[in-house]
């Protein structure tokens, strides 16, 4: 909130300030700076009273300040951080024009295939849940800034009539401790605003990473379904051929059953792959925020990115360790608990309110005035606040130990996540460079042997099935690598993701028999 707006709010109450003169506001300023001596200024002219009133207002504004939460500036800072905003731009659509602009951008993106970056940008432009996240943070930050302001004073006006006597009373009250604790309140408010700022960046990062994980899952499911479908078609033809050969007496019953079992396994595998594909795709659609028509035109790539030649180094991942979200938030929580202790420690003993009264009495044309003050002190007779102070001290110690634990866990989390990443990298690279090429060689050899009538068609189909299984495992290994890499980035910024890598089944190599 800017200064002019604060000044306007104060001026709205200037009517009663002019009526009771400058003395109440002078005393208010003195209380704010710690001097609670009630002065009796000399009578001055109305013009001087007005000047002093406005001067007092200005001094109070300077003393209290204007706590605020600059939401738009925080959004801009997040957009400039490429480690958080992977693609696109974060926009809080507050009006219809901004909402329409986001819709047009989403239409343009949906005209093409949706890669990982496009999926993230679509979520930023389409997702109502993401917009809800932004406005929830605006609420959090505004309430945090509000704690740095003191409660408004209360003004009461009364009119009493007794016979020919009419009495007008004006009464102004405010909390003395609220004024005395203002610097501590503003310090706590500043820390709370910092927490809201970090939470904004952290929550945006989590939303983006959730979409990236979902995109990887959906593309991997599409790729596995494609292989399962090819395997099903091949074994379906094999089962039909085995059935005819059994009818002509060219195949034993046991061989016929074996082929039928392979076909049944392929059927089940295809059904599972299809269900997984639908589940993963729909989850991505929900995260992005697509409607039915948009979901129908939504297309994904056919395969995941290839395994990189070299892994990322741990030094590159942990270069901004001290800026992790969890470390920063734990530190700010501890600082906030310390800052609040001073204010709450005093208020646990007592509370003090001071009031100013100005009465005007009209007794049948004879006018007189009464002025005075009232101080209300809460007496700590039954509750000295010791339990409240014990609770505050325990909270401070708890936040301190939590900060230490977060620092210790952060280092361990990094080591664990990086080890998982390197293991996934080695496995994925081994499948890409060793296992799948060897199965391709075996299938080529089986094809030559089949053409040379050394093996039969079923042995050839078995070699193809084993190659398909190796490719499926290779997809799973690549998917695990990409998931581990994203999780490593999450851990590096202090937002570990609750993700699990898929299991890879061992490929069984059977010894081929001659035909």
Image (cartoon, grey):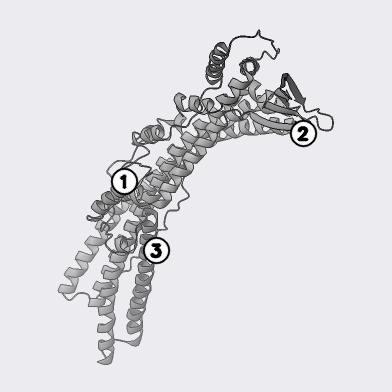
Q: Residue furthest left?
A: 452
The one of 372 and 489 positioned closer to us in this rendering? 372
Q: Residue furthest bottom?
A: 248
| Mark 1: secondary structure | helix
Mark 3 and mark 2 in contact (Cβ < 8 Å)? Answer: no
Mark 3 and mark 1 in contact (Cβ < 8 Å)? Answer: no
Horizontally, residue 370 falls left or right of residue 50, namely right
| Mark 3: secondary structure | helix
Separation of marks 2 and 3 at Cα, in angstroms: 52 Å
| Mark 2: secondary structure | helix
Which of marks 3 and 2 precedes in the sequence?
A: 3
When the figure is inspected, residue 211 is found, relative to residue 367, above or below; the finding is below
Separation of marks 1 and 3 at Cα, in angstroms: 34 Å
**Does residue 512 appear in the picture of this structure?**
no
Pick the quarter of the image with the C terminus.
Answer: bottom left
Q: Residue at horizontal 35%, vertical 42%?
A: 91
The one of 156 and 299 positioned closer to us in this rendering? 156
Q: Quadrant of residue 398?
A: top right
Separation of marks 2 and 1 at Cα, in angstroms: 54 Å
The one of 215 and 298 positioned closer to us in this rendering? 298
Horizontally, residue 107 falls left or right of residue 283, namely left
Q: Residue 276: image x %, image y %?
A: 38, 64
Label 1 crowding class (10 Å Cα cut-off): few <14, some 14-19, many 20+? few
Residue tagged 2 = 387
Query: Residue 97, which numbered label?
Result: 1
Which of marks 3 and 1 precedes in the sequence?
A: 1
Q: Residue at horizontal 27%, vertical 59%?
A: 299
Residue tagged 3 = 279
Q: Quadrant of residue 175?
A: top right
When the figure is inspected, residue 406 is found, relative to residue 346, above or below; the finding is below
**Does residue 260 appear in the picture of this structure?**
yes
Q: Residue 232: image x %, image y %?
A: 29, 73
């Amino acid at each position: 909130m800017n200064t002019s707006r604060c000044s306007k709010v104060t001026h709205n109450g200037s009517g009663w300030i002019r009526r009771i003169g400058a003395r109440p506001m002078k005393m208010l300023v003195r209380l704010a700076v710690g001097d609670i001596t009630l002065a009796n200024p000399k009578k001055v002219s109305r013009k001087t009273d007005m000047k002093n009133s406005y001067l007092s207002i200005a001094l109070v504004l300077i003393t209290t300040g204007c706590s605020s939460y600059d939401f738009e500036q925080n959004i801009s800072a997040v957009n400039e951080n490429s480690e958080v905003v992977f693609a696109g731009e974060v926009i809080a659509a507050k009006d219809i024009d901004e909402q329409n602009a986001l819709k047009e951008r989403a239409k343009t993106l949906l005209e093409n295939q949706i890669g990982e970056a496009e999926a993230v940008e679509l979520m930023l432009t389409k997702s109502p849940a993401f917009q809800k996240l932004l406005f929830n943070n605006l609420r959090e930050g505004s309430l945090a800034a509000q704690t740095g302001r003191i409660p408004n004073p209360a003004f009461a006006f009364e009119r009493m009539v007794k016979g020919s006597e009419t009495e007008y009373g004006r009464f102004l009250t405010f909390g003395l401790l609220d004024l005395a604790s203002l610097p501590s309140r503003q310090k706590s408010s500043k820390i709370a605003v910092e927490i809201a700022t970090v939470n904004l960046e952290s929550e945006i990062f989590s939303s983006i990473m959730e979409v990236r994980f979902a995109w990887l899952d959906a593309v991997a499911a599409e790729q596995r379904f494609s292989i399962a479908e090819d395997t099903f078609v091949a074994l379906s033809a094999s089962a039909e051929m085995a059935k005819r050969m059994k009818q002509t007496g060219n195949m034993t019953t046991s061989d016929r059953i074996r082929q039928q079992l392979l076909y049944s396994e392929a059927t089940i595998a295809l059904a599972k792959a299809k269900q997984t594909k639908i589940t993963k795709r729909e989850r991505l659609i929900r995260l992005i925020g697509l409607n039915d028509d948009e979901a129908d035109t939504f297309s994904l790539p056919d395969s995941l990115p290839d395994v990189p030649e070299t892994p990322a180094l741990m030094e590159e991942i942990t270069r901004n360790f001290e800026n992790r979200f969890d470390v920063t938030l734990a530190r700010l929580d501890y600082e906030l608990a310390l800052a609040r202790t001073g204010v709450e420690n005093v208020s646990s003993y007592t509370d003090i309110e001071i009031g100013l009264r100005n009465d005007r009495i009209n007794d049948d044309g004879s006018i007189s005035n009464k002025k005075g003050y009232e101080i209300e002190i809460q007496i700590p007779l039954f509750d000295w606040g010791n339990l409240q102070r014990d609770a505050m001290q325990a909270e401070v110690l708890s936040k301190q130990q939590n900060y230490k634990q977060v620092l210790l866990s952060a280092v361990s989390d990094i080591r664990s996540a990086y080890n998982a990443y390197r293991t996934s990298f080695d496995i994925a690279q081994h499948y890409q460079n060793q296992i799948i090429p060897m199965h391709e060689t075996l299938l080529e050899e089986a094809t030559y042997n089949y053409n040379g009538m050394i093996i039969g068609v079923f042995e050839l189909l078995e070699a193809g099935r084993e190659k398909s299984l190796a490719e499926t495992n290779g997809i799973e290994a690549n998917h695990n690598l990409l998931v581990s890499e994203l999780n490593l980035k999450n851990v590096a910024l202090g937002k570990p993701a609750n993700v699990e890598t898929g299991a890879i089944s061992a490929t069984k190599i059977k010894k081929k028999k001659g035909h």
